[in-house]
Amino acid sequence: MKLHLMILILLILILSCKEKTYPDWTTSISSVDDIFATFSSEIQINGEVYIDDSTQLMKPINLRIVNNILFINDNYNSELFSVYNMKTRKFVGRFLKQGKGPNEYLGGFSLSINPFIGDSLMVFNVINSTLNIFFLDNTCKSAGVPKRRIHLIPGKEREINERCFLFNNVLLTSGMFHQGRFHIYNLKGKDIGFFGKYPKVKCNGKYDNFHLGDKFGSSMNFVFDHNKNRVACTSSKSLTIYSYNKKNGLKISTHFDVQWDVPTFYSATYDKKSRARVVTLGNESDMIGAGFVTANKDYILFPFSNYPKIKIHKEGLEDWFGYIFVMDWDGNPIARLKLDKRIKFPLEIDETGRYVYSIHTDLEETGMRLIVRYDIGFLKDL
């Protein structure tokens, strides 16, 4: 009797310790049905309007949270960013004057804001490949004059850095490079290495890594989990998680990679300045993937649209994304969150890790863009 009881207890322990299995979505995602089947657990979540400020916000296109300060990219004002206190939700001023003069900056996505060392933030200017470092508590009074500038020196001719992120006292950049998918710079702006590979593609013309960089390297967004030594990055076509080993220097290797939209290059030509121009084929089943990824210590989140590209372009839709997909830092699919308010592409998680923020257009009443947030605190219980 005791032997049977011991065997039963042993079996219970074995079954309770068995790891949960997840579907493998690194092979092929060719339709919305495929990716919905992978992220099969659907949860409806309702967002709240976080900032509704028609006086200060004309047409926000992006947002960034740094140390409980919300920077909203709004190119319709003379300054590029509207700044809000996250605790009070109050407007506190504007940041970076738009223009071509001294200490002025061009708009659009030629700038990106990210945290820097201490109580500082860095503004990366794609136009001149320069990092502008500002004191965080003095941004609105700085008149666009940084306390420090770091010019990134490309390793080879024609290479372009498009986004820049601080990582373990070095800088990671995405862009278009001859070698490697991403590059690493020291804090003096010197190119000290690269990592990552491009996906294999079919091509009927001349191409090189610079062409691939245009599709699979530029405008990538990074998030980090320093507890698990992971780096995640995403574009509208792919999502990759890299592992790194701090003991052996910055040795980065691919931990997880999924590619759901590999284009067929049917022409690759050069203009007068020797820049690549790659044309891709598209169809009604093309999906709109991540674009911007965000994360907390447990999960990686990226927006997803069930609308095909052709519908978005034909109907001029403002807000593409009706879902936020959730995965863990090992690349396992956790859930898809169905949103009551469709959003544009930016996603941001605040310092608590509980709320995710984005931009929503109020088409029913005012037609204005609002800052909305969703409570994702329940994810810790999944």
Image (cartoon, rainbow, N blue to C red):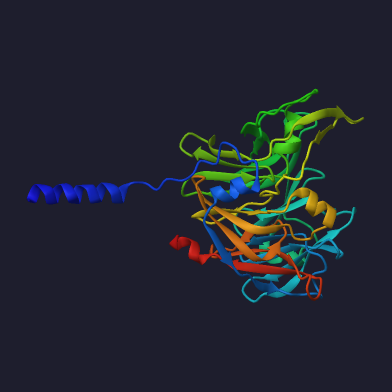
User: Which residue does the image show at 63% across and 58% down from the upper left?
Assistant: 323
Q: Residue at x 61, y 70 (%)?
A: 46
Quadrant of residue 257 within the rendered picture: top right
Residue at the outermost right position: 272
Q: Quadrant of the C terminus?
A: bottom left
Q: Residue drawn at (51%, 41%), measured in percent from left and top?
A: 24
- Taking depth in this image into account, of 206 and 82 the one nearest to the observer is 206
Question: At which x and y percent is residue 118?
Answer: 59, 57
Relative placement, left or right, of 92 versus 166 is right
Q: Position of residue 368 (x, y in %)?
A: 80, 70
113 displayed left or right of 332: right
**How many numbered callouts?**
0
Residue 160 or 191: which is nearer the viewer? Answer: 160
Q: Residue at x 74, y 63 (%)?
A: 72
Q: Is residue 204 above or below residue 280?
A: above
Q: Is residue 103 visible?
A: no
Q: Position of residue 71 (x, y in %)?
A: 71, 63
Left or right: 137 as drawn, with respect to 10: right
Left or right side of 326 for 219? right
Would residue 123 be seen by someone viewing this image from the given angle? yes
Nearest the viewer among 303 and 174 is: 303
Residue 174: percent from left, percent from top: 69, 41
Q: In the picture, residue 345 is in which quadrant?
A: bottom right
